[in-house]
Image: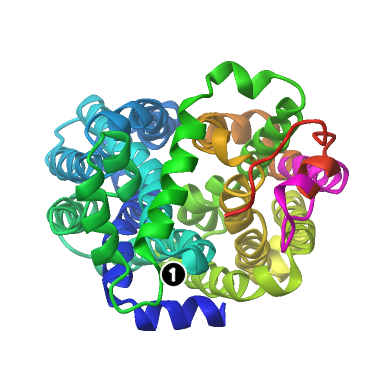
Amino acid sequence: MLEFLRELRTNAVVTRVAAIAAIGGFLFGYDTGIISGALLYIKRDFHAGPLEQEAIVSVLLIGAAAGALLSGWLADRIGRKYTKVISGSVYVIGALGCAFAVNAPMLIGFRALLGFAVGTASFVSPMYISEVAPPKARGGLTSFNQLAVTTGIAVAYLVDYAFKGVTGDWRWMLGIAVVPGAALAVGMLTVPRTPRWLLEQGKDDDARKALHVLRSGTDTDPDEELDKIRTSSQEANQTSIRDLVASPVRKLLVVGLGLAVFQQIVGVNTVIYYAPTILQETGLGAGNAITQTLTVGLTNVVFTIAAILLLDRVGRRPLLISGTVVAGIALLGLAAYFGFGTLRDHAPWLALGSLLLFIAGYAIGLGPVFWLMISEVFPQRLRSRAMSVTTIANWLANFAVSATFLTLAGAITQQGIFVLYAAMAAAAVAFFAWRVPETKGRSLEEIQRDVGGHDEPAASSS
């Protein structure tokens, strides 16, 4: 972490470029968080029932999966830079459409468009950052994108709070998203294309110029780094999607997909999307529920920062397993609160306390570790394709959870649904202990050996 901070201090260009690119992560977080407060007022104005509410929340995730699926092709076709310019522009259109929606179907349609932009931006942001970052700072900058996501969620909660008593409340909440969307689109026009993409287009001179700009003020040899990028790019171009399901890489893919799915099915986005709704069920009014939700966003940011500081000291597995155990205990706390009237009467703090404990455990474990590990566990030549598959799986699992929360809560009670999520957390802990290797300070050969992939030559760690 200290080396990462030193690298940022000596390379102002990369710091600025990474900050602009991370706005894509901020958009993901903002749109994830903003709907939680807005939904309380949308259902009032549109008389939306549980199914319409679930559609308003979850349709963004279908759009995001489509965006993530197409973003790989777009990023190769027109480059990472202009893919992000387009995603920021589409996001502005989607935000304006949501703000001026006259009925639930119109809102759902523009939420799908927003999802496309979010899915594209969230996929390309870490790709762009990893391709412009110096090797010494690459891990920290990847986590920096995750910090931008959690910051976006916290800012969304603040915006919900700021507009909770204003005429047109939810329209302002959704419409103000044009600001970060425009910042992404305009900001990306000012940054260089990635050297890797330029090399793939046969623009060697432009790639060299871009790398010299990105490494200005450092002791890095741009020509030597360019040769490494060229070799890595050539290896990646010699692979196909079929290589992902061939043994032993298939075992690594199982690890990535397990992380992707468990990150969502422990119910995290029921907290992010429905936190005010959950708190309203405790007897709070809409305004007070939104106010208390601010503490959820703040806890998320604080413990994400803690994770960034601890990941390279403690390791991935300890944070992943212990954080998920804490999240599971918190889910049982929510189940107990909604299951026993005595607790609701005499321990009204238990609902908020359990929400905060859950988000703390998640933010220090599954939240950042998933994104970091899928950038480490796969061989370099297959990394981009494998990350694409796992990212799409993550969005689809997110959709499955978000689209069923209110319906399941009505069918098996709120107590039942939190017990179900706690069971998923227990299954996640068992999977992590059984299949997920420690990647801190280890070569890819060692990682592959841990999951049974030792018979394939691995690319060296970068």
* Horizontal and vertical percent position of residue 65: 42, 29
Nearer to me, 294 or 213: 213
Q: Quadrant of the N terminus?
A: bottom right
Q: Could you say which quadrant of the image residue 364 lies in?
A: bottom right
Which quadrant would residue 323 be assigned to in this image? bottom right
Q: Quadrant of residue 287?
A: bottom left
**Residue 362 visible (yes or no):** yes
Please name the residue that numbered disc 1 is placed on: 294
Say how the picture is coloured: rainbow
Who's the residue at 32% across and 44% down the image? 121
Whether 163 is drawn above or below 231: the answer is: below
Residue name at image x 64 percent, y 40 percent: 378
- The answer to whether residue 126 shows anywhere in this view is no
* Amino acid residing under circle 1: Leu
How many discs appear?
1
Residue shown at 55%/82% (left/top)? 2
Q: Is residue 155 above or below residue 236?
A: below
Q: Is residue 354 left or right of residue 11?
A: right
Is 428 displayed left or right of 406 in the figure? right
Whole-percent x and y of residue 13?
26, 71
Q: Nearer the viewer, residue 200 or 163?
A: 200
Residue toward you, 176 or 160: 176
Graded by Cα atoms within 10 Å as few (under 14), some (14 to 19) or many (20 or more), the crowding at tag 1 reads many
Q: Judge by depth and name the residue closer to the eye, 277 or 341.
A: 277
Magenta-highlighted stretch: main secondary structure?
Answer: helix
Q: Which residues are magenta?
A: 421-445
Find numbered disc 1 in the image and state the secondary structure of the residue it sits on.
Answer: helix
Which residue does the image show at 39% across and 67% down from the upper left? Answer: 221
Residue 316 point in image, percent of width and height: 72, 60
Name the quadrant of the C terminus.
Answer: bottom right
- From this view, report whether residue 37 is shown above or below residue 71: below
